[in-house]
Amino acid sequence: MTDEIKKFYLKTSIYTNYSFYKKYFCESLPQDLKELTLLINKQYIHRTILFKEYLLNGKIKEEYPWYKYRSHDDILLTVPAIVSELFRLDNRGFHDNRKTADKVIITCRYSAILLASILKARNIPARVRSGFTPLADKTINCDHWLVEYYNEKSKRWIQIDSDIIEVEGNKNYDNTDVKNSLYINAAEAWLNVRSGKDDLNNYLHGSHIKGLDMLAKALFFDFHAIMNDEVSYLFFPVYIDEEKEFFNLSIDELKELDDLAVLMLDIDKNFDELRYLYRNDKRFHAINTPLLSDKDHLEL
């Protein structure tokens, strides 16, 4: 691990910028990582959990009014936005007894950028990752985001998760040191499927989206995240924004995605090459968003 790479992962993006919350992150939140992740987890409700608790079993209908947002994912894209909303809803900020109605409704990507921002504020190199984690039955891997931070004492990157705190039926699960067997990064998933080592049907985004094009987009989410550009899953690469575009890629273009994935298997070793591709390959860099479409990238 070079000092250059450490410094790079201390930098923030538009998404992880801790801004004027640096002092609060460093002095007012728990220093212990287990306590910190537990506290973060208590400030929000994952939108799929809200759906299950609100619509399917009716547990929190009285606690979370029908007229409140069902998801803040497309509103609170950045850490300053998330934290500001938490303070707006309850001026005590992060605390253990936040009311259900005063929680934000976000998913793992948003929890991950929040955790990464706090670690960066504390001068701990951190990077967000996009990949997959096995569901309870271990037959399907569902899309999931977490954080890697560099531990100076053990001289290694450690995976830490502030969204999945406990795994049902696994008493040995440690969310502050997630084992590789419980998390598959997007590059590994892509290459395993492309090589025939794994079944494409074993990977799922959200509750229903499958396919090689979904894996390609997950690869791009991870690529941008490791370049300190933690784009939301609402954003897509321009040249494969649509399904028909992806399935019209040539063999050579698919091979380019394979080559990118291989580089991403060892980020630190291939850091310079990855950063070069991010800065210079317009196809790998340019993205469409809910407000930006192909016509905004005509030069490509």
Image (spheres, grey):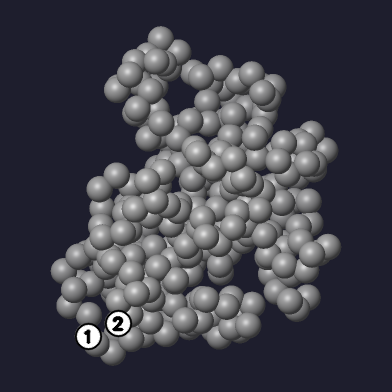
Tag 2, which secondary structure? helix
- For the view shown, which residue lies furthest in the top direction? 62
Name above or below for residue 101 compared with residue 3.
above
The image shows residue 192 at horizontal and vertical percentages of 37, 73
Name above or below for residue 253 compared with residue 78.
below
Name above or below for residue 226 compared with residue 36.
below
Residue at image coords 68%, 65%: 157
Location of mark 2 (residue): 254
The image shows residue 46 at horizontal and vertical percentages of 45, 35
Location of mark 1 (residue): 250
Circle 2 packing at 10 Å, graded few (<14), some (14-19), many (20+), is some
Looking at the image, do the residues carrying marks 1 and 2 touch, with CB atoms under 8 Å apart?
yes
Please tell me which residue lies in front, 78 or 211: 211
Give amino acid for label 2.
Leu
> Disc 1 and disc 2: Cα gap in Å?
6 Å
Tag 1, which secondary structure? loop
